[in-house]
Amino acid sequence: MMAFDAHIPVLVCCETYKFTERLLLDSVVLNELDNPEALSAPEGQKNHEDLVKLNLMYDVTPSKYVNGVITESGIIPVTSVPVVLRGKAKMDGGAY
């Protein structure tokens, strides 16, 4: 969002096998967790025993903030991701 506000293009590198038709409403749904101790507290912040750290591996970025997706097929606009998904479904014999 900061890059978008600063008019800096944002490109995402992602192989097409990672594309999914699932709708993720937030970054917690179907996310993987990393080591919470890898997160560092800001200097001067006290450790709180009742504070539980959560280190999410993935984030959800709304497509309006992404200018393009770099794939093994080349650079595609975000609006072409559903087209790629439909093509993959046809190749797999499934429906999109």
Image (spheres, helix red, strand yellow):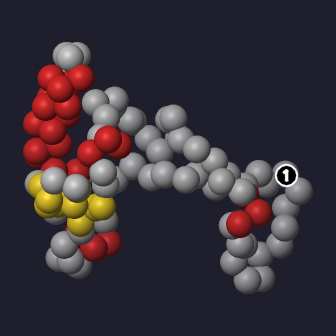
The answer to whether residue 45 is above or below residue 23 is below
The residue at 24%/66% (across/down) is 11
Would you identify the image quadrant in which residue 14 lies?
Answer: bottom left
The residue at 71%/72% (across/down) is 40
Q: Which image quadrant: the N terminus?
A: bottom left
Would you identify the image quadrant in which residue 32 lies?
Answer: top right
The answer to whether residue 87 is above or below residue 36 is above
The residue at 32%/72% (across/down) is 2
Residue found at the far right of this picture: 49
SS of the residue at dot 1? loop
- Near mark 1 (Cα within 10 A), the count class, few <14, some 14-19 or many ≥20, is few
Residue found at the far bottom of this picture: 43
Side of 18 relative to 71 (left or right): right
Res 82 seen here: no
The x, y position of residue 70, in whole percent, is: 22, 61
Q: Which image quadrant: the C terminus?
A: top left
Q: Which residue is mark 1?
A: 50
Side of 54 relative to 90 (left or right): right
How many numbered discs, if any?
1
The x, y position of residue 61, in whole percent, is: 34, 53
The x, y position of residue 79, in whole percent, is: 11, 46
The answer to whether residue 59 is above or below residue 9 is above
Would you identify the image quadrant in which residue 7 lies?
Answer: bottom left
